[in-house]
Image (cartoon, rainbow, N blue to C red):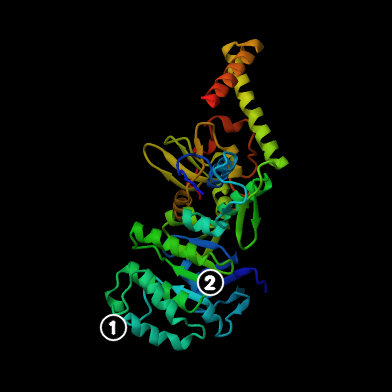
């Protein structure tokens, strides 16, 4: 597991851990069943407080990414759990909302947006074929 | 007596020559975590630690340590490892002699572990105590504490005089120790950068009183640092300026987060670093921090809008803290 913390990002440390571990799980880098270090080992390795790592793991567990075993550690849950899907849906919505906001400022119409989205999907499919 | 607390002080008071050295000191640490006790020199950190360890009598209040009341049974000594700012070992001893001298005092002394730790910390069994550098002496005292299988490590100013690399090594050693959920650490310091990262709980002490105790996040959330021009910060509408510092170019103070709304619009309000909190609290004058609601001028209620402009009638207010 790879966690790189920034002191100047303005993002709380627990949030950084949560996002990085969450991203690694969604990308498949951390596969189902992978063992994560215990909150105490992670705190030691990152030289941060136990409360911080505990909070990061608690939120990852609440969102269905991992399961924690008291006194042992934590492991990655299967990705298809409903909670993770909900999480992904929220990310899709957030991304589309951001796109909508930008489109409104740029004066784009519904058709323009759909065209852009179709273009992106096509490009991605062609990338996959290549 | 609660077993999920590493220790608890409740209303502890002690005097020196008729003056209070500690007054109504209360704070506690749950088992399994690190607490930093932060205060300037002379704030009462060492006195607090000496009371906690039963090395000093106290007149009022009670202290609980690892489930025992202090002063506790002699066996309690086995469970607590103390790292002081000076070594308590005889200078002419070699590190192997230190083991022979200390071993009889501890039922659970582990000689193999002692040698392992010295090796791990880069300490030579044949070295003499007096020839150790400051960092090596600290590591020796940690090795002793871990060899008698202490459950609570208490450090008095462990990092003062240590270079950054050794401080980082110390943070790693503390992290290793805390892999066991039954282990806890208290350390006192006036250097806050070490605690910014590894501290779970913090207790701020000033002039023998506890200013605040809680998780690090709670403490950081409780205050805001405010900065303004030379004339902008006074004692505006009841907001209490802690450790106000005034220079020809500007002013800076700490305020309680809930009071930031009472400040003028002309100031910069930011989340403080731990160091800024420590500096401003240490800079408080000897007067007590007033209770919320009693600060500022009575009868002058903050108007919802008064926050906006720096036309405070109390501009000439003394620099209360």
Nearest the viewer among B223 and B23 is B223
Q: How many neighbours does mark 1 have within 10 angstroms: few (below 14), some (14-19), or many (20 or more)?
A: few
Left or right: B86 as drawn, with respect to B282: left
Nearest the viewer among A130 and B218 is A130
Which residue: 46% across, 43% down? Answer: A6
The local secondary structure at tag 1 comes to: loop
Vertical arrangement, residue B61 with respect to residue A85, above or below: below
Where is residue B141 drawn, in percent x and y? 40, 74
Residue furthest to the left: B131
Vertical arrangement, residue B116 with respect to residue A2, above or below: below
Residue furthest to the bottom: B104
Label drawn at residue A12 = none
Residue furthest to the right: A82
Where is residue B293 drawn, in percent x and y? 64, 48
Q: Is residue B20 visible?
A: no
Where is residue B154 drawn, in percent x and y? 49, 70
Vertical arrangement, residue A2 with respect to residue B96, above or below: above
Where is residue B116 drawn, in percent x and y? 40, 74
Q: Is residue A38 visible?
A: yes
Verify CB contact (< 8 Å) between mark 1 and mark 2: no
Q: Earlier in the sequence, mark 1 or mark 2?
A: 1
Which residue: 45% across, 89% down? Answer: B104
Count of numbered labels shown in the rendering: 2
Nearest the viewer among A4 and B281 is A4
Which residue: 49% across, 62% down? Answer: B175
Identify the residue under disc 2.
Answer: B152
Q: How many neighbours does mark 2 have within 10 angstroms: few (below 14), some (14-19), or many (20 or more)?
A: many
């Amino acid at each position: 597991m790879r966690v790189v913390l920034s002191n100047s990002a303005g993002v709380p440390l627990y949030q950084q851990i949560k996002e990085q571990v969450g991203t690694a799980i969604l990308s498949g880098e951390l596969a189902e069943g992978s063992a994560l270090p215990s909150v105490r080992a992670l705190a030691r390795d990152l030289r941060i407080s136990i409360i911080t790592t505990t909070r990061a793991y608690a939120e990852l567990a609440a969102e269905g990414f991992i399961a924690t075993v008291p006194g042992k550690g934590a492991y990655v849950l299967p990705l298809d759990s409903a909670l993770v899907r909900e999480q992904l849906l929220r990310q899709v919505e957030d991304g589309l909302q951001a796109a909508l906001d930008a489109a409104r400022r740029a004066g784009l119409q519904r058709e323009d947006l759909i065209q852009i989205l179709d273009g992106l999907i096509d490009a991605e499919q062609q990338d996959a074929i290549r | 007596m609660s077993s999920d607390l590493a220790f608890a002080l409740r209303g502890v008071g002690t005097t020196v020559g008729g003056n209070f050295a500690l007054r109504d000191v209360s704070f506690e640490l749950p088992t399994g975590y690190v607490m930093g006790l932060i205060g300037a020199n002379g704030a009462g950190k060492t006195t607090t630690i000496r009371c906690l360890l039963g090395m000093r009598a106290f007149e009022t209040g009670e202290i609980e340590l690892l489930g025992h009341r202090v002063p506790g049974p002699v066996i309690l000594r086995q469970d607590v490892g103390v790292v002081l700012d000076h070594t308590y070992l005889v200078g002419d001893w070699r590190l192997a002699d230190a083991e022979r001298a200390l071993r009889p005092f501890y039922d659970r002394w582990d000689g193999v572990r002692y040698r392992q730790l010295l090796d791990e910390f880069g300490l030579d069994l044949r070295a003499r105590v007096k020839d150790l550098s400051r960092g090596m002496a600290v590591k020796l005292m940690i090795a002793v504490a871990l060899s008698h299988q202490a459950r609570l490590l208490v450090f008095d100013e462990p990092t003062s005089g240590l270079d950054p690399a050794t401080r980082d090594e110390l943070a790693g050693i503390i992290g290793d120790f805390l892999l066991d959920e039954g282990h806890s650490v208290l350390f006192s310091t006036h250097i806050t950068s070490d605690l910014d990262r590894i501290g779970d709980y913090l207790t701020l002490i000033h002039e023998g009183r506890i200013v605040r105790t809680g998780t690090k996040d709670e403490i950081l959330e409780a205050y805001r640092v405010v900065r303004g021009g030379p004339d902008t910060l006074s004692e505006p509408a009841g907001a209490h300026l802690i450790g106000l510092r005034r220079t020809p170019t500007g002013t800076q103070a700490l305020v309680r987060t809930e009071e930031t709304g009472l400040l003028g619009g002309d100031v910069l309000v930011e989340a403080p670093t731990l160091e800024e909190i420590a500096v401003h609290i240490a800079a408080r004058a000897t007067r007590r921090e007033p209770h919320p609601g009693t600060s500022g001028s009575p009868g002058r209620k903050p108007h919802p809008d008064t926050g906006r402009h720096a036309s405070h009638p109390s501009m000439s207010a003394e620099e209360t803290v």
